[in-house]
Amino acid sequence: MELDDAGRARALDLVRRLRDPRLPDEETDPLLTELERLLVNPHVSDLIFYHDPELTDDEVVTHARRYEPFAL
């Protein structure tokens, strides 16, 4: 599924907001859930917070879009 310009802009906004250290903890889960659904990637938080080297916001969205779920 492709991400249109509005979807990509929303994803970038969500990544920026999630990286903001002033974001209250209670606001994190809803934003992360929305981002996971938008990007269809359950591991996007790893890209935001744990990837080494650290990715830019744009790189997070680009990498997350490469995820392909598989059936067992």
Image (tube, rainbow, N blue to C red):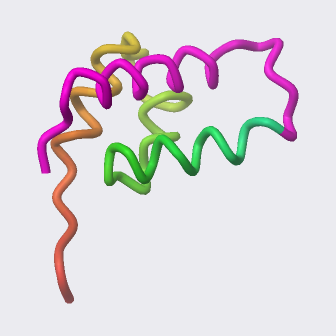
Q: How many marks?
A: 0
Magenta segment main secondary structure: helix
Horizontal relation, residue 38 to residue 20: left or right: left
Task: Determine whether 28 is above or below 48 in the image.
Answer: below
Task: Determine whether 23 is above or below 63 in the image.
Answer: above
Horizontal relation, residue 49 to residue 9: left or right: right
Q: Residue placed at 50% from the left, 23% from the top? A: 15
Q: Position of residue 33 (x, y in %)?
A: 57, 51
Is residue 52 among what the camera can see? no
Q: Residue furthest bottom?
A: 72
Q: Position of residue 30 (x, y in %)?
A: 68, 46
Question: Which region shows up in magenta?
Answer: 1-26
Quadrant in the rendering for residue 18: top right
Quadrant in the rendering for residue 52: top left
Horizontal relation, residue 14 to residue 2: left or right: right
Q: Residue placed at 55% from the left, 29% from the top? A: 49
Task: Determine whether 57 is above or below 6 in the image.
Answer: above
Q: Residue placed at 33% from the left, 44% from the top? A: 39
Q: Position of residue 42 (x, y in %)?
A: 42, 56
Q: Residue placed at 43% from the left, 50% from the top? A: 43
Is residue 72 among what the camera can see? yes
Magenta stretch holds residue 40: no
Horizontal relation, residue 63 to residue 2: left or right: right
| Image quarter in which the C terminus is found | bottom left
Magenta stretch holds residue 17: yes
Q: Residue furthest front?
A: 6
